[in-house]
Amino acid sequence: MSLLDRHLLQALLRGGSPVFLLLLGLFGFVALAEQLEDVGKGDFGTLEALRAVGFQLPRIALDLLPITCLLGTVIGLGQLASQLEVTALRASGISVTRLALPLLLMLLAVAASALILQQAVIPGFEGRASDLRARSFDNAAKEDDAYWTRSASSLVRVGEVAFGVMPSDIEIYRLDGEGQVRELIQATRADVVGPDSWLLHDVRVTRFEAQSVARSRFDQLPWSSDIDAEQIAALLQAEHALAPTDLIGYIGHLRSNDLDAHRFEVLLWQLLGLPMGLFAMGLLGLPFVVGNVRSTPLSARITLCALIGILFYLLERTCLQVGLLYRWPAPLAGLAPDGLALAAALVSLRLKR
């Protein structure tokens, strides 16, 4: 690595690191405020709230990476541009493409780290945060790997959660008005097809009648769950915390059972488009630091890029919801914002060459 590359990389690190830490602290504080609202419920205390936020920080960091790449480029290289170092490099024959090389290397490292976080770190941390949140429910508990929860008429045990979103090894005890078990439903797995609707697979039903026990089997059996939505959320992995391999496996499971997999296909494409979004936002900041930079103060350029980052975030969320609502093709709904941002960055760089 040349001296020029090291100098530019150090500038990018000096520009991006404070932005990342500031945003992470701000959004972490907001997450802590949300967790503190549940302090005092069940066994959920202040220490559990702090630990839950700590487990959520990797996922928050992942959401902040695109805007960090944009602002880090503008602040880091913008400081060099304000000191005319970029102008001197351009006058000595260094092209915009050559200036972008250290940035591309850093963006490649950031993108690889983001994918590792999503695959290996975030799912486990989010699961531990959900375990802590489950303590806020008086009628829920977790023993070993099994999750227990209770409603007015049911006692539910879930042995494990496959792919992060599919309850498996399920036992449902239906109770009468006196709290006695009248029916036991055992299922190998279930698909959560709605807020209060499960589709059970490979089901065995045992009914305890006055003088006998009746048993029956079903390949599939719908079950109207009366479990609170927050308890279900504590059991299942949040969609944004799913690992790519879990998404791929669950999509295959849904397709093999003729179930709608569109939502998870969009989420998978959005996740796979993350490296493209990071490269797009990083490169989009480069045109702001080449050319005539004296006409616009650095603070104004930072403010403008912050607005661009916010618009990109809103565009991602809007495309996701609109794509799900109108059933756009999954690649279009998942990659459209990243593709538009990358096209805008490449056009802007071409105009600056």
Image (tube, helix red, strand yellow):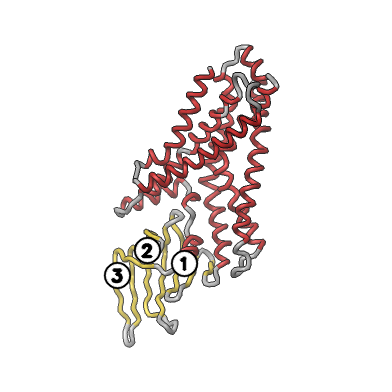
Residue 291 point in image, percent of width and height: 59, 19
Vertically, is 80 above or below 340? above
Give the residue at x 51% y 31%.
280
Residue 152 point in image, percent of width and height: 45, 76
Q: Earlier in the sequence, mark 1 or mark 3?
A: 3
Vertically, is 239 above or below 115? below
Q: Secondary structure at mark 3?
A: strand
Judging depth in this view, the residue of 103 and 290 nearest the camera is 290
Q: Secondary structure at mark 2?
A: strand
Which circle, 1 or 3, is nearer the viewer? 1
CB atoms of marks 1 and 3 within 8 Å:
no
Q: Kindly report the distance in space between the C-alpha atoms of the residues bearing marks 1 and 2.
A: 12 Å
Please name the residue that numbered disc 1 is placed on: 228
Q: Earlier in the sequence, mark 3 or mark 2?
A: 2
Give the residue at x 63% y 43%.
23
Q: Earlier in the sequence, mark 1 or mark 2?
A: 2
Please name the residue that numbered disc 3 is placed on: 217
Judging depth in this view, the residue of 100 and 159 nearest the camera is 100
User: Badge 1 local density, few (<14 within 10 Å), some, or many (20+)?
Assistant: few
Q: Amino acid at mark 2?
A: Ser
Give the residue at x 63% y 25%.
296
Please name the residue that numbered disc 2 is placed on: 197
Q: Kindly report the distance in space between the C-alpha atoms of the residues bearing marks 1 and 3.
A: 27 Å
Vertically, is 66 above or below 351? below
